[in-house]
Image: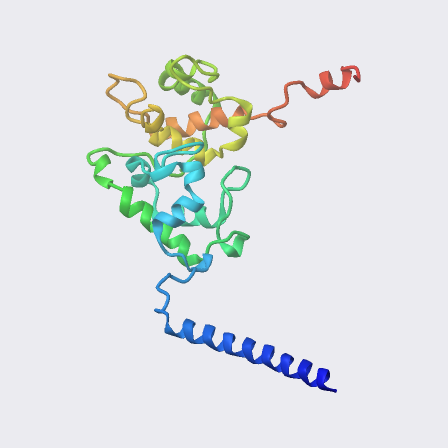
């Protein structure tokens, strides 16, 4: 009987000791200074341009808009011909058939409408300088008429072949732009944008400087025709090294 009481008292002592330790820990926590660490921000609440651009745009368009796999957004000529509403629509809905995805939540992306506004307005306010084309009569961002393939080939030979080759397959001075994969990944509007604005990060001039010393820049229609010629060189199954007929004749290994 005495042993049972001793065990009971020992158990009570352990419980009491545990309770006291818990109280001391609680008091110690209450005595601490309040935490000053910022609370984590939900992805949909991020509203900082630098963060949004770095997370969603820099992978293709380069850090600080300097260009990468896709065009430089910090190109003032580009920002002088495209309007903010058009860019906002592209960011929100993407470009079908190209590597540009839709970012708006309503289109399956991750960004809110407000975040898309922050990105587009930030691009224009930070990198746009409309005075870069003062005195010039720039071509329209979008084509106003249909293009002519034959005239486009002639215009390409005049303005583009010195760097890209007469067939567009590249030279030591310029890259291939009729490559199957390139044409499969760039829309007609993307081609037009590049012809007008150039790619300064790659040393490619805009529509005014395609032929050094030539006093007359490319006309709006010549640009439309060049794009028509480039588009005509797209193939149905890009990137395949063998035609369908040749592939069928190859023996199985």
Picture quadrant of residue 253: top right
Picture coordinates of residue 77, whole percent (x, y): 29, 35
**What residue is drawn where x is 28% and y is 26%?**
208
* Residue 143 visible, this orientation: no
Work out whether residue 251 or residue 246 is closer to the camera in this orientation and state it. 251
Q: Is residue 193 above or below residue 158?
A: below
**What residue is drawn where x is 63% and y is 19%?**
241
Q: Would residue 104 be found to the left or right of residue 119 on screen?
A: right
Q: Would residue 158 be found to the left or right of residue 127 on screen?
A: right
Q: Is residue 76 above or below residue 160?
A: below
Work out whether residue 92 or residue 213 is closer to the camera in this orientation and state it. 92
Picture coordinates of residue 148, whole percent (x, y): 46, 26
Q: Quadrant of the N terminus?
A: bottom right
Picture quadrant of residue 141: top left
**What residue is drawn where x is 48% and y is 49%?**
103
Picture quadrant of residue 249: top right
Picture coordinates of residue 222, whole percent (x, y): 38, 26
* Residue 147 visible, this orientation: yes
Q: Would residue 92 be found to the left or right of residue 241 on screen?
A: left
């Amino acid at each position: 009987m005495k042993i049972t009481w001793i065990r009971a008292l020992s158990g009570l002592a352990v419980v009491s000791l545990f309770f006291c330790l818990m109280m001391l820990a609680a008091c110690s926590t209450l005595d601490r200074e309040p935490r000053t660490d910022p609370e984590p921000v939900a992805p949909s609440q991020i509203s900082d341009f630098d963060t949004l651009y770095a997370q969603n745009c820099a992978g293709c368009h380069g850090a600080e808009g300097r260009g990468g796999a896709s065009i430089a957004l910090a190109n003032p000529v580009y920002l002088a011909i495209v309007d903010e509403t058009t860019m906002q629509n592209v960011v929100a809905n993407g470009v079908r058939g190209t590597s540009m995805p839709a970012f708006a939540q309503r289109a399956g992306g991750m960004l809110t409408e407000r975040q898309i506004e922050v990105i587009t307005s930030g691009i224009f306010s930070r990198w746009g300088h409309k005075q870069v084309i003062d005195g010039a009569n720039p071509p329209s961002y979008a084509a106003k008429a249909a293009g002519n393939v034959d005239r486009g080939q002639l215009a390409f030979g005049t303005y583009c072949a010195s760097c890209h080759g007469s067939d567009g397959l590249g030279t030591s001075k310029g890259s291939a732009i009729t490559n199957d994969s390139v044409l499969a990944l760039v829309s007609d509007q993307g081609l037009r944008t590049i012809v007008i604005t150039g790619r300064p990060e790659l040393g490619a001039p805009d529509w005014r400087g395609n032929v050094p010393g030539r006093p007359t820049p490319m006309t709006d229609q010549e640009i439309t025709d060049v794009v028509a010629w480039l588009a005509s060189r797209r193939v149905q199954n890009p990137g395949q090294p063998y035609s369908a007929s040749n592939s069928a004749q190859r023996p199985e290994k």
